[in-house]
Amino acid sequence: QKEVEQDPGPLSVPEGAIVSLNCTYSNSAFQYFMWYRQYSRKGPELLMYTYSSGNKEDGRFTAQVDKSSKYISLFIRDSQPSDSATYLCAIPNTNAGKSTFGDGTTLTVKP
Amino acid sequence: NAGVTQTPKFQVLKTGQSMTLQCAQDMNHEYMSWYRQDPGMGLRLIHYSVGAGITDQGEVPNGYNVSRSTTEDFPLRLLSAAPSQTSVYFCASSPQGVEQYFGPGTRLTVT
């Protein structure tokens, strides 16, 4: 079983929609849950992350972790065409500075 | 700060040729990693380093070598290029082992 699995997509939504991006993970010992955004032909950039369980909000973005079901989600409110990108969930190995990534979900927000 | 830089941006190799992908960071991060990204797939770890002089293998190390003689530089060597190594290569660094900062990538084609 992969350490982290991501809903594959792709997703296409109209501007202003609420977007939900989802991943599951295998090891209940994981503490950090990361979301990276990758624009076409660019390197990934850190969007936000949560530690342990609960929600974290940053503007239109909310990251949520449900440790009981090993489920992580990223919600985007009032989606904009500029949100069109691939979103990658990731679990870091903090002792080694490396991460295991989901396969990514490509989101297109249509004006 | 320039962040994480990678050279070259693009490269075409013939099967059997060797080359080195350069990666440098100016943030004094101890942790550095190399990933490859293939279409429809997430990032797969090739090699990583927890500090100067220390490297280890990731998920897909075959055909690649690394060294870390300084904190700043982490070059990736392709020993004898094969078409299966056609991919986009990303270098990343991390200050504390949680978040990673990625370079812009090198697009490699092996014919």
Image (spheres, coloured by chain):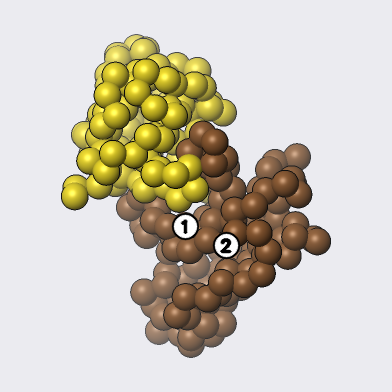
Q: What residue did someone put label 1 on? A: A36
Residue drawn at point x = 80 percent, y = 61 percent: A68
Residue drawn at point x = 44 percent, y = 29 percent: B50
Which kind of residue does numbered mark 1 sit on? Tyr
Residue A61 in the image, given as x and y percentages of width and height? 50, 75
Q: Quadrant of residue A93?
A: top right
> Pointer 1 and pointer 2: residues touching (CB < 8 Å)?
no
Output the chain of dot 1: A
Residue A102 in the image, given as x and y percentages of width and height? 59, 49
Task: Judge by depth and name the residue closer to the eye, A100 or B41.
Answer: A100
Residue B62 lies, with reference to residue B3, above or below; the image says: above
Name the tint of chain A in the rendering: brown
Residue B92 lies, with reference to residue B72, above or below; the image says: below
Position of residue A103 in the picture relative to residue B20 (left or right) = right
Q: Residue furthest left?
A: B1
Residue drawn at point x = 44 percent, y = 63 percent: A47
